[in-house]
Image (cartoon, rainbow, N blue to C red):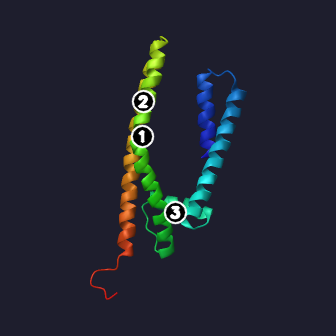
Amino acid sequence: MALWVLVVWTGVQLVIHRGHKPVEALISGLFCAVFCTVWFLVRRRRDGRAVGTEPDAVPSLDRRIQKEDVPEDPAEREFMRLLIEPRANQLRRSGRWGLPLVVAMTVLLAVLFFILGSWVAGSCAIAGGAALFVFALWNRRRLGGRFARMEERLADVRRPPRGSAA
């Protein structure tokens, strides 16, 4: 992930500055890559502590959630349930303010560019904001559906089969 951040950030900086200041673009890209790496490591440690597992096990649980694969081990299923539950709640909570914030920031930025007389930048801000909004909405629906399906599958596995003498 850090390598992607470094490449994309440096590329965007080079495009913005039209190829000038390549050293500054690389330094800012390195700073962003280090920041993202530290952020992901802290999140992994926090998630591991929250579900009661090692931080190194969190990425494998995340991959299994992405593939919608329910583990056979009851302990892993419980860890997965404990990992999905707060993420699904966070996704629901952020939907109330996240998408309207994207729209508000896009409109404000476009209006600022239009006031300053830069019609091209204002139009680019609207197009970029619309693309970001559509991507965020699509990603939110995709993740929400995945979390709901995984919660349902994990609940089905916990229930005893009908007609069993348990």
Mark nearest the camera among 2 and 3 is 2
Q: What residue type is labelled 1?
A: Trp
The residue indicated by pointer 1 is 97
| Residue displayed at 40% across by 44% down | 95
User: Relative to 117, is 64 above or below?
Assistant: below
The residue indicated by pointer 2 is 104
| Residues marked 2 and 1 touching at CB (< 8 Å) | no
Residue 133: quarter of image: top left
Residue 15: x %, y % from top left: 59, 24
Q: Is mark 3 on a helix, strand or loop?
A: helix
User: Relative to 121, is 38 above or below?
Assistant: below
| Residue displayed at 36% across by 58% down | 148
Q: Which residue is outermost to the left?
A: 163
User: Relative to 110, is 1 above or below?
Assistant: below
Q: Earlier in the sequence, mark 2 or mark 1?
A: 1
Residue 107: x %, y % from top left: 42, 25
